[in-house]
Image (cartoon, rainbow, N blue to C red):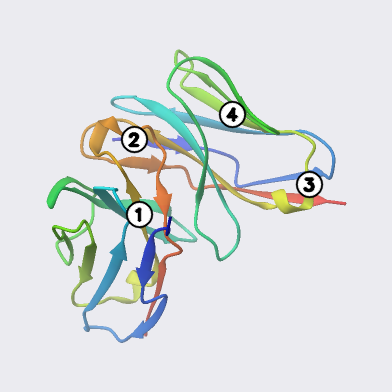
Amino acid sequence: GQSLEQPSEVTAVEGAIVQINCTYQTSGFYGLSWYQQHDGGAPTFLSYNALDGLEETGRFSSFLSRSDSYGYLLLQELQMKDSASYFCAVMGGGADGLTFGKGTHLIIQP
Amino acid sequence: KAGVTQTPRYLIKTRGQQVTLSCSPISGHRSVSWYQQTPGQGLQFLFEYFSETQRNKGNFPGRFSGRQFSNSRSEMNVSTLELGDSALYLCASTPWGGNANTGELFFGEGSRLTVL
């Protein structure tokens, strides 16, 4: 089986940087993904890490350490539109499909 | 290119009824997976279909079933509805299936089911 842990809520200030952590336990591992979901909307793909290290896509970066079963999503220059829920997800192989964490609700304050 | 389309967007059923939800994937995508999203449990994997074959199945009772057609459109069915089945049911598609997936799923906006 697979399980992922991430904080339920994080609060940050507009213009600042915030890091959302994710730890996982899996029986197999192919990669760690991150998704963003606004209230009432569909989850949208942000990034995918299959190898250790940092992947950067604009204001968003994602990091993976396979040896620590740990990853994080880094959001820079926060904007009000970044207020959303963020999910980490593991592709662990086997019959479990893509397993999601329960999500982190990011609150941006002006 | 049209996105993933799910119908109906909202529906209300009563306990004991059954429901069928439909998903049309992005053109060219052959893999369709279904997820149940609830406030308490987050997104939970239901099943994945690739080229009309169920490849993976999550830990849900047999009341939850699905199928995929030759045009890659998919349906899921829930029989003998229970109050706890109230949730947002999300469909996602990718060009690939199973472990070839790079973790990038393209989600529809979901079908919100309320069971009374």
Amino acid at circle 4: Tyr
Image mark for residue A79: 3
Q: Is residue B104 above or below residue B44?
A: above
Q: Is residue A62 left or right of residue B77?
A: right
| Picture coordinates of residue A18, whole percent (x, y) | 73, 35
User: On the image, which quarter does residue B75 sit in?
Assistant: bottom left
Amino acid at circle 3: Gln
| Circles 1 and 4: CB atoms closer than 8 Å | no
Q: Residue at x 35, y 40 (%)?
A: A98
Cα distance between the residues tagged 4 and 2: 18 Å
Both marks 4 and 2 on one chain: yes
User: On the image, which quarter does residue B14 sit in?
Assistant: bottom left
Task: Please tell me whether mark 3 or mark 2 is closer to you in this view.
Answer: 3
Image mark for residue B26: 1
Amino acid at circle 2: Gln
Task: Please tell me whether mark 3 or mark 4 is closer to you in this view.
Answer: 3
Q: Would you call the spot at circle 3 few (<14 residues within 10 Å), some (14-19), or many (20 or more)?
A: some
Q: Residue at x 42, y 39 (%)?
A: B104
Q: Residue at x 45, y 12 (%)?
A: A67
Query: Quick one: label 4 or label 2, which is nearer the N terminus?
Result: 2
Cα distance between the residues tagged 1 and 2: 28 Å
| Picture coordinates of residue B67, whole percent (x, y) | 15, 60
Task: Please tell me whether mark 3 or mark 1 is closer to you in this view.
Answer: 1
Q: Is residue B65 above or below residue A102?
A: below
Image mark for residue A38: none
Q: Residue at x 50, y 52 (%)?
A: A43
Q: Secondary structure at mark 2?
A: loop
Q: Secondary structure at mark 1?
A: loop
Chain letter for mark 1, please: B
| Picture coordinates of residue B76, whole percent (x, y) | 23, 66
Q: Which residue is mark 2?
A: A2
